[in-house]
Structure formats: structure tokens, C-alpha cells
Amino acid sequence: MKKLMASLVAAACLLNLPAAHASVFTLNFEASDFPVYDFGFVTAPQTDVVGSITYTAAVQNAPVTAIDAVDLVIAGHTYALANVDHYSFYEDSIFHGWTVGPLGLGVGLANFNLDFDGANVRSFSYTVDNYNIWQAGNITSTVVQQTVSAVPEPGTVPLLLAGFGVLWLRLRHKASAPSTGAATVTA
């Protein structure tokens, strides 16, 4: 029975090679057709906004778990990864970002909101002065899944080594065990 248990434990250790599974996607989008703001008749400072956000999720339509990279400039403001965040709203992920002018002053402030359902950008708006907000009338977007190799779980290597160790001990014990053959007696 001990031999069977040792063999089963060794096999389980060798066959248990899980990998962390997270998919990385890149959302490419273009927002345009920003109407003139109603109250001040102010034209949007940037008529076409083109950008991309790389994020991690279990599958394409699953909630976003992390933002990995950002390539976005609005009205001269470049967004860094630290300036962009996300939250879930029902099935959608909302990406939003902010930048501020020199010395952290509100002058030169730029904010954006992007409502994304996992396949399409539903809405995009931005402001550069926290007063006038421009909502895109036309949005095109594509989502591309990045190729990422599987990452072994942290416990995989020790578990694999333990499995090899059990097999080695089992084989060593079997090779060094004295023969238990029945003795024959002749008269």
C-alpha cells in the first residue's frame, strides 16, 4: 500500500503543472466629431483623439484587472500609466485619466473618460479646463489580444522537484532493498 501511495504522490506532483492564465489586450481607439460646446461656443482643442490602452483581463469581455500601458495625448497632455485608472460599472470598464500642469497646479488640467464594454468603446469625453467637456460623436475601436506565454505558478518548480525527489527515493529504496525471495531447503 505504501508503494502505491508513493507512486500516486509522485505522479500527482509531476502531472500538476498549473500556469497562471491572464490575457493581455490592447484597445486601439479613435474619437472624433466633437461638437461645439453649447454654453461658450468653444471649439474642442483637439478634433481627433487617437490612442491605445493595454490592459489585463481573464478574457476579452471580463472585467479589467490591470492597466499595463497607455499611449494617449490630448491637447498636448501626455498620459502616463500613473495618470490612468479604471473601475467597473455593471459589465463595462470605465477608463479615466487626469494630468495637471506644472507644479501640480490646475492650470493645464486634462481629464478623459472612456466607457468600454470589452469589445467597443461606448463613449469618450474629455476636458482641458474642467469647465468645457467635449463628448465624441464618432468612435471607432478595435481590441487585439496580445500573445503572452504562460507563467508558471510560484509553487510549480518546488512541486516538480519534490515529485522527482519522491521518485528518486522510491527507486533508490527499491534498488537497495534486500531480496525477499523464499529460501529453499533441500533434505
Image: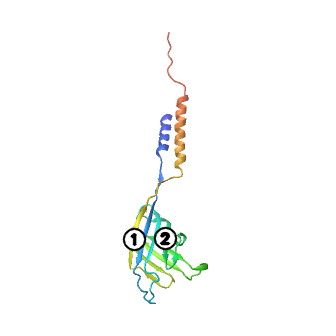
Residue 149: x and y, percent? Answer: 46, 55
Residue 114 image offset from top left, x and y in percent: 44, 74
Left-right relation of 137 to 177 = left
Q: CA–CA distance between discs 1 and 2?
A: 14 Å
Find numbered disc 1 in the image and state the secondary structure of the residue it sits on: strand
Residue at the bottom extreme, as displayed: 40
Which residue is disc 2 drawn over? 71
Please name the amino acid that badge 2 sits on: Asp
Label 1 crowd (10 A; few <14 / some 14-19 / many >=20): some
Q: Nearer the viewer, mark 1 or mark 2?
A: 2
Amino acid under disc 1 = Ser
Q: Which mark is residue 141?
A: 1
Q: Is residue 80 above or below residue 156?
A: below
Q: Which sits in the foreground, 149 or 175?
A: 149
Label 2 crowd (10 A; few <14 / some 14-19 / many >=20): some
Residue 63 vs residue 136, the one in the foreground: 136
Q: Earlier in the sequence, mark 1 or mark 2?
A: 2
Residue name at image x 47 percent, y 41 percent: 11
**Which residue: 50% across, 14% down?**
185
User: Under tag 2, what secondary structure?
Assistant: strand
- Does residue 142 lie above or below 32 as drawn? above
Picture coordinates of residue 174, whole percent (x, y): 52, 30
Q: Residue furthest top?
A: 187
Q: Position of residue 34 (x, y in %)?
A: 41, 82
Among the 4 quarters of the image, the one containing residue 39: bottom left
Q: Is residue 61 above or below residue 109?
A: above
Q: Residue at x 51, y 18 (%)?
A: 183
Q: On residue 123, which mark appears?
A: none
